[in-house]
Amino acid sequence: MNTSLAQRFIQKIALVYPTAKRWLYRFHGGVFPPYHKSLSLRQPIRPQLIPDRLILPLQQQVGQPAELLVEVGSYVKKNQLLAQSHKDANKDLVVPVHAPTSGFVEAIEAYSLPHASGLKAMSIVIKPDHKENAIDNVLNVNGALPETPQAIKEILFHAGIVGMGGAGFPSYAKLPKEKGKIHTLLINGAECEPFITCDDLLMQTKAHEIIQGAVIVADALGADKLLCGIESNKPEAIQAMQTAAAKTRVEIHIVQTVYPMGGQKQLIQELTGIEVPHNLHSVDLGLLMMNVATYAAIYRAVTFGEPLTSRLVTVSGLGLESPFNIQALIGTPFAVLANAAQPKVEIDYPLVMGGPMMGFQVQDNQVPVIKTTNCILANPPEPIEMQMPCIRCGECMDACPVNLLPQQLYWYSQSHEFDKVEKLNIADCIECGCCSYVCPSHIPLVQYYRHAKSEIKVIHAEVKAAEIAKQRHEFRLARIEREKLERETRLQAKKDAVKKQVADKLAQAGDSPESAVAPTQKSSPAVLAARAAAARRAAKSKATSTKDHNEPESDQLSPKTPVQEKMPTARRKAIEAAQKASEAAGTEKNPKTAAKNAAMAAAKKRALAKKQEVDAPPFESNDRPNETSTATSTEQRAANIPDVTDASQSTQTPDLTLDSTSEKLTKEVDDVTQNKRQKAIEAARKRARERQAKPPETN
Amino acid sequence: MNQPTRSSSPYVHNNQNVRKLMLQVQIAAFPALLMHIYIFGFGIVVQWLLAVATLLVVEYTMLKLRGRPVIPFITDMSALITITGLVFCIPPGAPWWIIVSGSTFALIFGKHLYGGLGYNPFNPAMLGYAFLLISFPVQMTQWIVPSEIAGYYMGFMDALQLVFMGHIPDISMDAITGATPLNEMRIGISQGVTVAETLNPLLSANDRSVHFMFGFSSWEWVNLSFLLGGLWMLYSRTIRWQFPVGFLGSLALMGFIFHAIDPNTYPPVDFVLLSGGTMLAAFFIITDPVTASTTPKGRFIYACGIGVLVYVIRSWGAFPDGIAFAIILMNIAVPLIDQYTQPRVFGHKH
């Protein structure tokens, strides 16, 4: 196109000094690997191929799996919605799944995903009936173009469109809500990875759809500028796109062929000159970039109401006799496509999803094509050279498109000095693989960075958890202190009141010779006395039938404690209620040891009632994962017991003397206690539910 | 280490490796080697063969002692570069034990004791050279006089005899050995002879056509052949431009400034740039990536530092050529330079 004189001059230099090509584009570094693109460009796009079965993972993108709508055995039509997202899809990044063809649901089970880890996910297995019974316009579009961001987001969401360049971020979530926020819409047609040609062919054959898709999005978002970047090694695609864009406002820019030109931040810089700051997303700057395939899918969804059920996939590699591109149904196993390209030898090595620079080996060659699968690569494994020590040559640094110091990152990653790795901005590493590609010592640098990144993530999580635990602990200490004070004052008041009451009652009852013994301190005689009193009162059989109220009480209390920080007042109320109850019930109270024994004995007798009123164990188990909370609850329990005994001590005196009266009193109080306890439990349950609803913050 | 296949991306490589890199350096040294042979005779060949023999023994022993695989590390060619650098620095007629002890010291103390290739903080060749300069100053300053001046060309057998026996039959040692131009210069200055007089062939002792071959002296020709090899390395991206540009630039600037201040005491720029081991250092020694700074700015600063130090040591120090010491001093500063010259990462505008 309009190459400047300087550029042409540099291109001349590049003929004798290849590295001069690095002066032709705006970002730093980059590499020029052998592209092998002609391999898969030799053939036209293959007609659709319907395999014996399709495997549709419920989760194909960043985010969460979709909710299943079909059952094993049900018949599905092409384009039918198989799994939907629940209401709050925006938050969880759920993308619906549609049937790529008609057939029966054969199974719903876990299958290996095309993911570096080989992890398995629930998938719908469809046995196609080859009839292609389709539901047309499943998205119910009426041909009207969406005019607001919300409208287009809605369509993208229901069409199940994700970023098809590789990252697979749900497209509806990528679009901003406000109109006019995006001023420049960018079309990524760079396709810089070697071997891959699916975008190239798409631009050659569906240029109109891409351009129109982009215009639709731009109109809906209120973007005025439309820029498309295509690498110079795709002249036919450039030609087709320029023709299709002729009467639109889309500007086609030819960009230098260099890896990783297709990187979002790299292409943005190349097209607009804007360097996206490390702490911002391009959307924050009013720039939105999507892949050509995504725009084409958007066009089909908006115009024909078609969901995303197939995509153009490159099947290439040095191990294949006739590599090709195919409009592959989502869910087609990799091996089916690879075998269709006539492997030179049987494929007993792992296939790669994506290009050789950033792709990954799949753990199982039967993994299905998903929405982000742009390439299936069958390169026979070649022996690699032995890893040598780093000689600090700096090739990696010269190649890094982000201008990091890969050699120093490696050095510190290797010695596990992750704080230094972080300081060298490893977070900005895009894992493009340029450094590993040029390393003369054959060090798998990117592997080191991935490891370091995950380690740093763990360290951060730990630091955060420790910080939260510390805050909690401090908060708890302060609260215990405060409560202790409050309790003491309250207790004092109660003590006085009870004393007075007892005195009154005594006066009423007339004679009470034993009351002289009353103010016993907490000692073994007192314990014995308490037991004796209890035994006498409980006329039926077991000695400790009713006096154990306080113990179950504290047991019920403990599950609440983990959430107490969130609702200190409510909790305090519960504690108060419990305390009141125990104090009231504790007219026949016992010291610590007795209380413990009592709890055990009581458990049997009151099992029935307890089951009804308290569902304490579920609460507890819910909270258990949180270690700090368990610790809190036990401590709380420990803190509660002396309390109760204190209270009981004070009421020992009337106990010993006023058997009959106190028994009646106890009964009454018992009922009150029941009510209060019920309330407390309700509150605790409610809190537990809330807690469950909210994901735990600590991890 | 030593996985059979790549376990994660990228699955492709540009097929460059350490051995190829080192061989490129070795190849680039050939013009200078041939020039050396043409001017000073076969002394350097004898020295080089001795050094290679020493290398094989030392590397094998050290790798065995360190429990490392011998074949991959002995064939990484890094030791060859070290001894080549060293061989160019010692007089071609020096006794055999000079190069043997120097190479041994360089490889053991300069490389293996630090953990082998990639882990040494000091340039091994320069460490060996410094060791020899300090330990055997007499042997290290007795250069063979260029054949054009001495009127005698040293063949391979003569060189062998000289290196192993200490003399060549029927030839007076005084006739064929002398000081290097740099040394002559410093002696001259210390005796009150002006730079111009020392450089002027008509006035100097060696009046037998110092300026031969297209106006360049023999030492200048050696330096120019190093320059040739260096330019090829720049082109093939074996070395980075910051090193020679920074080093030669700062050295030239120092030379220019002081020559302008006092032309009688300080030699002119062309002499500074084309004498001693200037070009050898600029393209072959300071470019050793292991011991140099790795950041682009850092490389430049590192090279400039060496240039300044070389001039300082040459002009006012106790040694005729300060390259070894200048490089070792700057090696010490490398971690600091690296720390403060980190490039701006994409998206991090300050």
Image (spheres, rainbow, N blue to C red):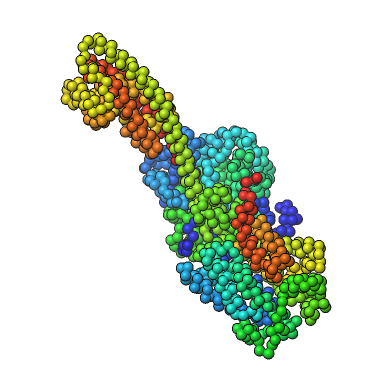
Q: Residue at x 45, y 34 (%)?
A: A474
Q: Is residue B213 visible?
A: yes
Which residue is outermost to the bottom?
A: B170
Q: Is residue B99 above or below residue B243?
A: below
| Residue B175 placement: quadrant | bottom right
Give coordinates of residue B248: x percent, y percent: 72, 64
Relative to A405, is B35 on the left or the right? right
Relative to A184, is A95 on the left or the right? left
Give coordinates of residue A32: x percent, y percent: 61, 59
Q: State the residue in front, B185 or B217.
A: B185
- Quadrant location of the C terminus of chain A? top left
Give coordinates of residue A8: x percent, y percent: 73, 57
Q: State the residue in front, B40 or B224.
A: B40
Q: Is residue A46 visible?
A: no
Q: Residue at x 66, y 59 (%)?
A: B302
Q: State the residue in front, B118 or A425.
A: B118
Give coordinates of residue B38: x percent, y percent: 70, 80
Relative to A165, is B176 on the left or the right? right
Q: Is residue B160 above or below residue A279?
A: below
Q: Residue at x 37, y 28 (%)?
A: A684
Q: Residue at x 49, y 70 (%)?
A: B63
User: How many labels were placed on the picture?
Assistant: 0
| Residue B161 placement: quadrant | bottom right
Which residue is outermost to the right?
A: B202
